[in-house]
Image (cartoon, grey):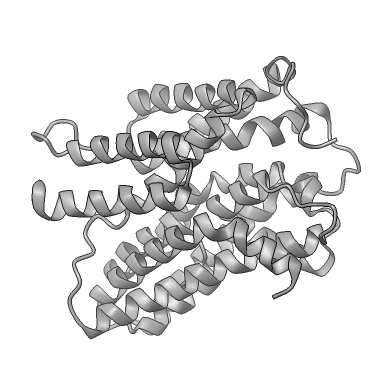
Amino acid sequence: MIDIAHSLAIIAVVSITTFALRAAPFVIFGSKKKLSSGFTHLSTCLPPAIMATLVFYCLRNIDWYIGGKWLPEIICALLVVILHSWRKNILLSVAVGTISYMLMVQWLFA
Amino acid sequence: MSKNLKFAFRQTIPVLMGYLFIGVAFGLMLSDIGYHFLWAGFISIVVYAGSMQYLMVTLLSGGASLLFVLMMTLFVNGRHVFYGISMIEKFRDMGKRYPYMIFSLTDETYSLLGRTQVPATLDEQKVLFQISMLNHSYWVIGSLLGGLVGQLGAFNSTGIEFSMTAIFLAIVVEQWGEKKNRIPILIGIGCSLCFLLILGAEQFILPSLSLTVLIILLFGNKMRKGGEEVYD
């Protein structure tokens, strides 16, 4: 049976903490009229660096040791890279990458 | 549809399917552990954080302690601290929309808002707000759909979480096309690999992002040489 009170408490903790994390830089730096050049560099250089980091974050649990279990991730990641360099269409890259991955883990490598 | 909304919608198309996908996956997983599909919608409205919601399925099913939930949230969503830094200028004059813009600053919304150049003929603040609202609504709709499908019958969604990887990967490939982004991307890759090897999968992301920020703060002016400024 679902513990409704505890479920709501968990949801509240995650929700409030996440909002606090998102709000922190605005609270700390938001009142300054003009940001230092260091922060201007952050605003332009950080997004591409974080996106690259998030790719590793998504792929962090790849199991390199058990035979072939890492193959679907690597094949589909390469597929997304090649497809996106070629067609430059995010929707297409994500759809083909994800569907290929689902087919592989459900049938080919199951 | 107003011109603003039309433009905003076009910007969000790449996120549309990704969020529906990941939202559906979340809804499916939550219904697997016995939650009514409205719970999925509710969580997606008030939490709105992709990877953390995946983790929440585990936390809810195990009835985790609130202290543990707090620590896991700080851990998994700690990277969000870095997002706001680059949005302070953009959100400064958002008025009553300001709190919502901060609340809804997810990975994907952050990347969309960061690269969207709103034409001068449109109302920039309205467009940015609509982009955030649209993304949030895709997420909620996806979660509700997933929960409903999970409640109704069987659908094998194994592997659907790869859509998250695919989105970030495609964005990186796209950003790589602009020369000025290459050094930051390489720094991101270098720091990630470094801390993955040293600290392992579950602890690499915060140290990696901290070092990335430090490197950019120290050497940012050299990186941007020759590259155009996005903000003046």
Q: Residue at x 84, y 65 (%)?
A: B95
Label count reads 0
Residue B96 location, quadrant: bottom right
Left or right relative to B111: residue A56: left
Q: Percent position (x, y) of residue A33?
A: 91, 43
A76 shown above or below B222:
below
Q: Nearer the viewer, residue B29 or A11?
A: B29
Residue B88 in the image: state x and y as whole percent.
Answer: 77, 47
Q: Is residue B166 above or below residue B53?
A: above
> Could you say which quadrant of the image residue B2 lies in?
bottom right
Q: Nearer the viewer, residue A8 or A102?
A: A102
Q: Residue furthest front?
A: A87
Tell me if A7 is positioned left or right of B11 in this view. left
Which residue is pictured at 27% across the width and 67% down the height? B62
| Residue B205 is at least partly visible in this image | no
- At x 47%, y 55%, the residue is B73
| Residue A90 shows in this picture | yes
Residue A72: percent from left, percent from top = 20, 41
Q: Nearer the viewer, residue A84 or B58?
A: A84
Q: Residue shown at 53%/73% (left/top)?
A: B45
> Residue B14's x, y, as percent?
51, 55
Q: Nearer the viewer, residue A82 or A39?
A: A82
From this view, report whether residue A2 is shown above or below residue B211: below
Placement of the N terminus of chain A among the 4 image quadrants: bottom left
